[in-house]
Amino acid sequence: MRTRAPFLFGPLTGKAKAALAGVLVGFTGLLLGAVFIQPWAEPKWMFLDALTAAELSGDCCHVYYGFISNLGIMLWSGTAAACLIAACCLYAAKASAPALRFAVCASVFTGWLALDDAFLLHELVLPSLGLPQALVLGVTAGLALLYVALNWRLILCQEWWVLALGVGGLAISVAVDQVFHSLSPVLVYLEDSAKFFGIVCWAGFHLMTVFLLLTELLTDRQGARS
């Protein structure tokens, strides 16, 4: 097995980039648009996590509570699981160090984000144990920088702009939450729409990248046998 960096698959063509951007934005836009225009429920309760919606609405409980929030957690979790499986395959096949490091880092960090989102770690749990929310967010930001520092070469050789869009959406969500501390419908829509778009882009980048890494591994193996 060669030990070169796994950069067989370079950046996409212009048309492919446009198609990918269309899928990411289109999927997010259609889903969020459907939530906004549906006539049966207040969209705010579909954006907030289910427990918060049940507590604040005074009308417990409805199956649509936390709909967007739960979808986001599913995307976090699915992406973390896919990266973990990819890491196991790459390790078993003695893949190159950059590929294995990327898959492991992506799995661990995305798994942490999934746990944080699912159990409100930075909002409720860790502050109740004496860790300020600002400290937890700072540690998460530090982990994000470490993730990039360890994998920046591979990231830049893939569709890094998708990851940048995801990070931008998540940053907007955190900024709205930290600056306004409000549950007004407009701010909830802005915060959680940006967050969901960020999660979709984060998942799209990592799922596409580990797929390409595994595809390259298979290509290398097939070339070695021929």
Image: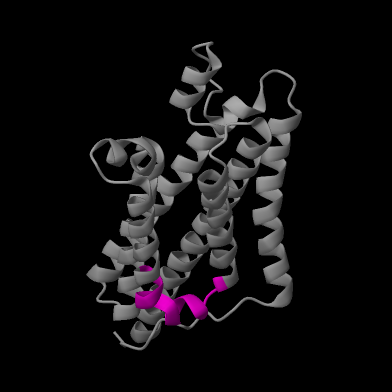
Locate the C terminus by quadrant: bottom left
Foreground of the two, 217 or 11: 11
Count of residue discs = 0
Position in image of residue 86 (x %, y %) = 35, 62
Q: Is residue 27 left or right of residue 76?
A: right
Foreground of the two, 215 or 29: 29
Position in image of residue 105 (x %, y %) = 33, 65
Residue 157 in magenta stretch: yes
Color style of the picture: one colour
Residue 109 in magenta stretch: no
Residue ID at (55%, 47%): 179
Residue ID at (31%, 72%): 100
Q: Is residue 189 depicted above or below 57 in this figure? A: below
Magenta residue span: 147-160
Q: Is residue 43 left or right of residue 223?
A: right
The chief SS type of the magenta part is: helix
Q: Mark yes or no: residue 108 visible.
A: yes
Locate the N terminus by quadrant: bottom left
Residue found at the far top of this picture: 59
Position in image of residue 186 (x %, y %) = 68, 36
Foreground of the two, 57 or 25: 57
Q: Is residue 26 depicted above or below 35 in this figure? A: below
Q: Mark yes or no: residue 81 visible.
A: no
Among the 4 quarters of the image, the one containing residue 172: bottom right
Residue ID at (34%, 85%): 224
Position in image of residue 40 (x %, y %) = 70, 18
Among the 4 quarters of the image, the one containing residue 220: bottom left
